[in-house]
């Protein structure tokens, strides 16, 4: 946000501004920071971004919630899948109420995109999304091919590029 504004960015009033942050905060700090503190930090950062962008013209925001991290290949392999899923669900349950407060505070429109539900459904019903691989990433931690995606068609049918990124 600061780089955008610092570069002279303005936002037309009819634009849809997407703010999707928090995943890295949770994944990097989940083992050492209480869920409520992490959630408050991320929600405060979202509010700061909305306020800053609103001051430069943004009126309409889309804020996706977060998927259950434990259902990613990396989350499943971590041995902390249940804890990671609980953390994402805790955050998502607080997101809606907080965003209503930001709408009132800044006089903006905020829409929530249900990424958690979308990922849950894609994992439960992969064929509905043209997927046949929701568990094995195309790339390993060093961004080398895992063998799960030997063709473009196989890559298109995989949910995860690496251990955590869709």
Image (cartoon, rainbow, N blue to C red):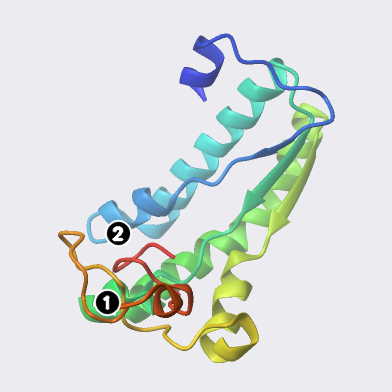
In the image, 147 versus 65, the foreground residue is 147
At label 1, counting other C-alpha atoms closer than 10 Å, the crowd grade (few under 14, some 14-19, many 20 or more) is some
Q: Position of residue 30 (x, y in %)?
A: 30, 59
**Total numbered badges shown on the rendered structure:** 2
Image coordinates of residue 93 in percent, x first then y, are 61, 64
The residue tagged with tag 1: helix, strand or loop? loop
Taking the spot 36% from the left edge, 84% from the top edge, the residue there is: 135
Earlier in the chain: of badge 1 and badge 2, it is 2
> Given contact means CB atoms under 8 Å apart, are the residues at marks 1 and 2 in contact?
yes
Q: CA–CA distance between discs 1 and 2?
A: 10 Å
Q: Is residue 134 above or below residue 58?
A: below
Q: Locate residue 103 relative to residue 68 in the image: left or right.
A: right
User: Is residue 91 shown above or below 106?
Assistant: below
Q: Which residue is mark 1?
A: 80
* Crowding near the residue tagged with mark 2, few <14, some 14–19, many ≥20 C-alpha atoms within 10 Å: some
Q: Nearer the viewer, residue 9 or 57?
A: 9
Q: Which mark is residue 29?
A: none
Point out residue 108 in the picture as x, y percentages from the top left corner: 80, 33
> Which element is circle 2 on?
loop
Task: Locate the C terminus by quadrant.
Answer: bottom left
Is residue 116 placed above or below 110 in the rendered structure?
below
Picture coordinates of residue 118, whole percent (x, y): 62, 73
Residue tagged 2 = 30
Residue 7 shown left or right of residue 15 in the figure: left
Identity of the residue drawn at 55% across and 90% down? 124
Query: Residue placed at 59% from the left, 58% from the top?
Result: 65
Q: Is 162 placed left or right of 93 in the picture?
A: left
């Amino acid at each position: 946000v600061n780089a955008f504004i610092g570069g002279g960015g303005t936002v037309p009033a009819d634009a849809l501004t997407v703010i999707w942050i928090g995943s890295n905060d949770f994944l990097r700090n989940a083992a050492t920071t209480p869920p409520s503190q992490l959630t408050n930090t991320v929600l405060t950062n979202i509010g700061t971004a909305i306020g800053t962008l609103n001051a430069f013209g943004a009126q309409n925001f889309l804020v996706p919630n977060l998927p259950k991290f434990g259902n990613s290949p990396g989350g499943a392999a971590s041995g902390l899948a249940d804890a990671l899923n609980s953390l994402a669900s805790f955050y998502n349950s607080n997101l809606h109420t907080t965003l209503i407060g930001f709408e009132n505070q800044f006089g903006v429109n905020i829409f929530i995109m249900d990424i958690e539900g979308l990922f849950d459904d894609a994992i439960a019903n992969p064929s509905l999304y043209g997927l046949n691989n929701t568990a094995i990433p195309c790339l390993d931690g060093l961004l080398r091919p895992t063998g799960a995606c030997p063709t473009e068609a196989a890559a298109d049918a995989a949910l995860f590029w690496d251990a955590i990124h869709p």
